[in-house]
Image (cartoon, rainbow, N blue to C red):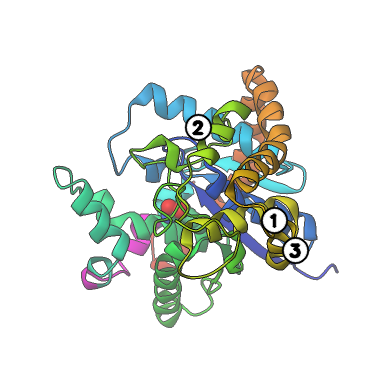
Amino acid sequence: MEKKRKVSLSGIQPSGKITLGNYLGSIKNWVDIQDSDEFDNRYCVVDLHAITVRQNPDDLREQTYQLFAQLLAAGLDPDKCVLFIQSHVPGHPELSWVLSCFTMFGELSRMTQFKDKSQRHADNVNAGLFTYPVLMAADILIYDADIVPVGEDQRQHVELARDIAIRFNNRFPGSFVVPEAFIPKEGAKIMSLQDPSRKMSKSDSNENAYILVMDSPDDILRKFKRAVTDSDSRVAFSEDKPGVSNLINIYSVATGKTVAQVEAEFEGKGYGAFKPAVAEAVIELLRPLREKSLELLKDRAYLEDVMAKGAQKARDITDAKVMDIYDRLGFVRRR
Ligand code: TRP
């Protein structure tokens, strides 16, 4: 019999557009894990999570299509992974309810993302914002995921999913695999082009702070030309030069060159030469992604077909898992 492979699962929100930071920090890692052929892969667009803050319905729908197309364009292959929309798989919210009864109020109160978001959306501190990490735990545990590739900012949520799994397993042994966060090397952390102390984020009010996967080459060039650097003009990586260091990091990831190679390449050349070179590298990195996405978006029926097939595969796994957990809890079997 074939040895059972480990499972990798992750999710990404369809709130807003996808940035270079999302691509390098998340999506590219998923594609690399998929292509390593070492894991069974499950990746989803987490639209249920997106409504914890108010969304315009038409925008949400459009962003979901866009994100799904970008995931395919980036190289996620529906024959190699289960790729789906979270709201198409009812097992996620079903398990979420169960897990919420195994999660403590105090634990959820300590989540930094909840504290942040409830400050930023003080007029809408809804229960979904509070229980968001429980739904995320359900996303993970329902597939018995071994690894969860995420950014550093999601580590605390994955830790909570572990704690919930362990607690549930103590009461009902062997129910869930206890997952582990899989956080990529520092190289992939892309900061704002306007304030390099902050992560590059699509929710930034200044659109020059981020590069979108769908930005035109002209936009990309303009944004890099305006990127914040510092007063001297040496292309050198150091803690007291966060703006330039961020650009070096981006150039390094986009070209595959090491930081030392980048420094040597621009020795004595200054920012006037360096910034357009970074822009050019990013334009070429994103070009195939953007072109393929635009092509896929012309064929909604195709996208919907891929979504439906992904959801069916996901339901085959999750329906069985929910039944198993319901049995353990003592619910009468539904038929
Ligand atoms: N909370 C994650 C984020 O904001 C998205 C997410 C939802 C997720 N469910 C998940 C990530 C399950 C990994 C696994 O980035």
Residue 320 in view of the camera: no
Q: Position of residue 222 (x, y in %)?
A: 53, 32
Say which of 108 and 253 sits in front.
253
* SS label for mark 1: loop
Which of disc 2 and disc 3 is earlier in sequence?
A: 2
Q: Which residues are magenta?
A: 96-106
Q: In terms of sequence position, does the residue under pointer 1 or pointer 3 come before the other? A: 3
Was residue 2 drawn as part of the magenta stretch in this picture?
no
Q: Position of residue 108 (x, y in %)?
A: 27, 66
Seen at 48% across and 35% down, the residue is 17
Q: Mark 3 is on which residue type?
A: Gln
Q: Give how far apart the Cα atoms at labels 3 and 2 are.
A: 39 Å
Say which quadrant the N terminus sits in. Answer: bottom right
Instruction: Measure the alpha-carbon separation of dots 1 and 2.
Output: 40 Å
Q: Which residue is mark 2?
A: 64
What type is the residue that disc 2 sits on?
A: Thr
Name the image quarter holding residue 144: bottom right
